[in-house]
Amino acid sequence: MKKHLILLVFLLILTLVFGTGCSQPAESPAEAPAEQPSEVEKEPVVVATMLDSEGSIFGKMIIQVLNANGIETVDKVNFGTPDILRKALENGEVDLVLDYTGSGQYYHPEDATDTSIWNDPQKGYELTAKLDKEKMNLLWLTPASANNTEMIAIKREFAEANNIVTMTDLAAYINDGNPFKLICSAGFAENSMGLLGYEEAYGFKLKDDQLIILSSGNTAEMLKALSEGTNDVNASLVYGTDGALDKMNLVVVEDPAQVPPVYLPAPVLRGEVAESYPEIEGLLKPIFESLNLEALQKLNAQVAYDGKDAAAVADAYLKENGFLK
């Protein structure tokens, strides 16, 4: 009996030992793979420009290149006057604008006490870019080399008839009491490096009835008034890149005192948007580098004088120069 009991206990122990060792642990349910976070959807880039033909061309170029490279845009070309455009950029209402390096003197007047800086294309660009980055987180990208500075244009026949070549000649003509009426923008008329600077440097002073002042800087409208003699206009504000001068038989009055600052056109991008789209700078750099004074004058002439659509002009240039297929 004892033997049977001992055998039974022994078998029970074997069963417990080997049964436990051979049994497989219950499988835990397979863990679901971790869900990959989806890429944050990027906001479209709002592109805006001032109210002029040059801004339209640049704006359309920027939009077309960004779209062609998978960057969605919102077209705000011809958005408003320079002050409205700048305020919208600072407030984040728009993301990418076309601006001019010499404008830094207005955006940061407290840091622009040395006015000679704005007559140097590189120094003016670097200071504007530095101040805007530090104070506003706005990035000035590579500018074009074309100087779109402010000058005064007159009819060729008028210049020849009155022996006017330089601003000194024009000042003498005005001071002699001859009929004179200038059409220009408010920004030029009220600027110490614009009309006020010309008056001081060359010793003349225009009366209120010798001025027609427009709120925008659209020189196409101004040059049309000059060409047609509207309201007795015989002089107009003109920019260095205006393409209609030769076609309209107009000449620029030379400025030996170099009163106005250098204005290089450049894209200006909000820093937050640059972080989302770091490729924008590289996409726009070669395009702006290709636009010298002659190239930009020809493009402007097609829009301002020939009446072509800015988008079509921009598209043709980009394709002809290999920036778009």
Image: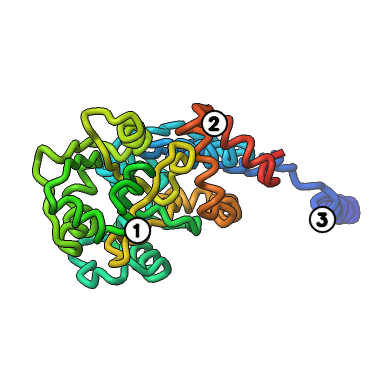
Residue 209 makes an appearance in the image:
yes
Label drawn at residue 254 = 1
Quadrant in which residue 319 is drawn: top right
Distance between mark 1 and mark 3 Cα atoms: 108 Å
Distance between mark 1 and mark 2 Cα atoms: 33 Å
From the image, tell me which residue sits under label 3: 17
Label 1 vs 2, first from the N-terminus: 1
Q: Is residue 141 left or right of residue 90?
A: right
Q: Nearer the viewer, mark 1 or mark 2?
A: 1
Residue pictured at 56% horizontal, 57% vertical: 289
Query: Is the Cβ of the residue at disc 1 closer than 8 Å to that at disc 3?
Result: no
- Judge whether 149 appears above or below 256 on screen: above
Amino acid of disc 3? Val
Amino acid of disc 1? Glu
Q: Looking at the picture, tell me which residue is in the foreground, 46 or 107.
A: 107
Q: Is residue 215 left or right of residue 160?
A: left
Residue pictured at 55% horizontal, 52% vertical: 291
x, y percent for residue 151: 32, 52
x, y percent for residue 212: 19, 36
From the image, tell me which residue sits under label 2: 311
